[in-house]
Amino acid sequence: MAFAMRLRSFGEPEDVLTPDPLDLDDESLQPSSGEVLVEVAAAGVNFPDLLIVQGKYQAKPPFPFAPGGEVSGVVRHVGSDVDSVRVGDRVIAITGFGGFSTHVVVPETSVARMPREMDFRQAAALVTTYGTTLYALVTRASLQRGETLLVLGASGGIGTAAIELGRVLGARVIAAGSRRSLGPSRRLGADAVIDYEAADLKSRVRELTDGRGADVVIDPVGGIFTEPAVRSMAWGGRHLMVGFAAGPIPQLPLNLLLLKSTSSMGVFWGAWAAREPICFRRHIELLFRWNLEGKITPKISKSYPLDAAPEALRDLAERRVVGKCVLHTPALESTASPAHALGSGRAATGTAPITRLPAVIRAAPPPCSPANHKPRFFHYERRCSPVGPRQNPTRASSRRE
């Protein structure tokens, strides 16, 4: 049965989120020009989904609506003027909201083909957290090989992604989180860990960096942890504000930025992806490649049936999730091989390799997509990187090969 987990008022997930049947012949599920209908196999569950349901997010869609910002699945219909995907392609899609559903219509620019070898659950768990983190570390902060990266909220989706991507990019990673996150953080490859509920965060970072401080801080937590993290930064450090999982929005004394020529910058990946669809697809291509090479692997605590979305959101709210959790739909449950069998047509014989993107994208590869994915090539041009290349003579040797 086609259905969506919708709400008609804001509140706690178990009180307001209920199954709502979908009519696949309804006009709202017929893709218009430049749109694609995706049959959803899996949907990622993220902290913004919880905030949207509770009415605490900056975007408030009109009722009724389904939360869910990222999905994986199969293209079932395409509108006119769509040339980057075809019916039967296995894809990921950024939905904003509406992803907690068996079917969803999205713009073509928010869709990217996924490798045939990738599991739908892994794909759904990869896009938002790893996409946000790659954009933050590379495009916004221009993280360099050999620099020190401090990761707050190390057990969450952004935190686990930042540990893995920091290692891939050649940074020294310090993971900070609750006591229960320390073991998983070490297993992911963190060079050092901090229990920031028990230790003084600023002092501990200074100890671990011989007094120098962290070059980059990725902060999806906010609250009482932001200011000590900013105080722990090195000269020229960059603080990345991703979210406020701890609740309160921090009031940061701006003189802290002045004293060491540091910066604090926002990370709004969804808006960037909509403004830079080619760069978005190149980032997703790179993440898929690193996943297939075994360099990054989304940590999925649990997969829930779609109609158990309230339970998944409650577990997320109560910090019972390490990494990510996902929802799976009846379409995925009905397949003999969840990783491969849902697709038909082109997907049945294998989607074209992810490196062979449509000609419209291949014709002018943007600066955000180097052919050679080595960290030293991540000095993007200003079009895809508001920060631009960093000129730090003390770190020049780290960029040589």
Image (cartoon, helix red, strand yellow):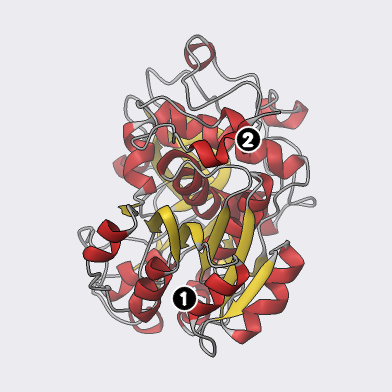
* Residue mark closest to the camera, 1 vs 2: 2
Q: Indicate the position of residue 386 as horizontal and vertical percent values.
A: 33, 35
Q: Which mark is residue 397?
A: 2
Left or right of 105? Residue 297 is: right
The residue under the point 34% across, 82% down is: 12
- Asked whether the viewer can see residue 3, the reply is no
Q: Indicate the position of residue 342 as horizontal and vertical percent values.
A: 68, 44
Answer with mark 1 or mark 2, whichever residue precedes in sequence.
1
In three-dimensional space, the C-alpha distance between marks 1 and 2, rounded to whole angstroms, equals 27 Å
- Which three-letter amino acid code belongs to the residue tagged 1? Lys
Q: Which mark is residue 202?
A: 1
- Asked whether the viewer can see residue 342, the reply is yes
- Which three-letter amino acid code belongs to the residue tagged 2? Ser
Q: Indicate the position of residue 58 as horizontal and vertical percent values.
A: 23, 62
- Which residue is more in the foreground, 59 or 365? 365
Left or right of 242? Residue 399 is: right
SS at circle 1 = helix
- Which residue is more in the foreground, 349 or 383? 383
